[in-house]
Image: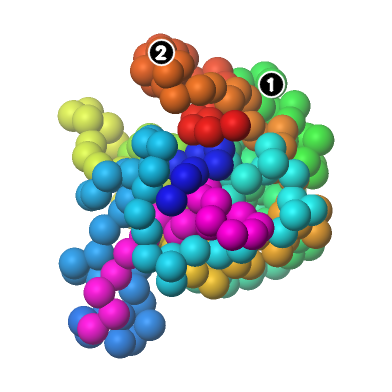
Amino acid sequence: MPTRSTSTIARPPARGSGRATTRTSCGRCAACLANRPTVCPTGSLLGRDVDGGLAERVAVDELQLLPIPAELDRAAEPLLQVLGTCIHAQAGMPTRAGTALVVGLGVSGLIHLQLLRRRGIDVIGVGRSVGKRALASELGAIATCEPAECEATVRRVTDGVGASMVVEAVGTVATLAQAVRAAAPGAVILCFGTITGSNSGESFPWYELYHKAITVVSPRAAMLRDYADGIALAARGQVTLAPLLSRTVSLAEAPAAFKALQASAAGLKTAVRILD
């Protein structure tokens, strides 16, 4: 099946275009029967557990395909997979009255910011990049700051209460600890960033986690309906995705693009265009 502009965008042979969801599941295990296919023990992710879409032809189950409306901006298409995972993550995040904090202003952090704003929640954005903080302000953040100013900024904006909802979108012990310290009593923290280990010497405010009675939500992947909801939101212009696409490269340029991403985190999303 020819791909369109990223590893998860496919063009069916007859009419229209579609996107392949990246998570597969068996449909028979206890998790799948409980409608929790994202934790299927034999499930897999395209591009990680099985070959992905960096090829001219990719075969996927037709049940994994979703149609892309013609009115959707092509620049938004490479962001639909991330959008679906953010929607899935926030579906398990109970709303708290007050101000939200997003730690990390990469692609996922900026999408989370917009989804929180759609809930009617004021959002503070924390990130190292001046450009990403400026984009966060354009997308609706009421305040932004560098990581070193996080707790002071949250105290100032919330009159000392703390953030009632926190999205950790980096994936380090240090940034999760920062989320706990900035959280208000009774807050909910969404651990969106994936933490795979801890460096020696890193500390974590375990007592604050208990003392503040914080709820921790730890989502995984996304379901088909999350991607469908994301496509609908993007097609209606209810989330802004095009500015999050920094660069589109050809398949031949992909190796150099991967090296550039490893060398610098200054940009946002890089998409690989398989076929024009």
Of pointers 2 and 1, the one earlier in the residue sequence:
1
Q: Residues within 10 Å of mark 2 (few under 14, many from 20)?
A: few
Name the residue nearer the viewer: 216 or 61. Answer: 61
Tell me what residue is drawn at x 51 percent, y 23 percent: 250
Tell me what residue is drawn at x 59 percent, y 59 percent: 14
> Is residue 179 in view?
no
Amino acid tagged 1: Gly
* Total numbered labels: 2
Mark 1 secondary-structure assignment: helix
User: What number is the disc on residue 131?
Assistant: 1
Amino acid tagged 2: Ala
Disc 2: which residue: 256
Q: Which residues are magenta?
A: 9-28
Name the residue nearer the viewer: 156 or 238. Answer: 238
Q: Is residue 158 left or right of residue 236?
A: left
Up-down: is 182 above or below 244? below
Separation (CA) of disc 2 from disc 1: 23 Å
Residue 97, image x and y in percent?
70, 67
Name the residue nearer the viewer: 27 or 64. Answer: 64
Viewer-side label of 2, 1: 2
Residue 108, image x and y in percent?
55, 44
> Is residue 140 in view?
yes
Location of the C terminus by quadrant is top right
Q: Residue furthest front?
A: 14
Residue 102 is drawn in which quadrant?
A: top right
Main secondary structure found in the magenta portion: loop
Residue 148 is drawn in which quadrant?
A: top right
Q: Is residue 176 left or right of residue 122?
A: left
Name the residue nearer the viewer: 172 or 272. Answer: 272
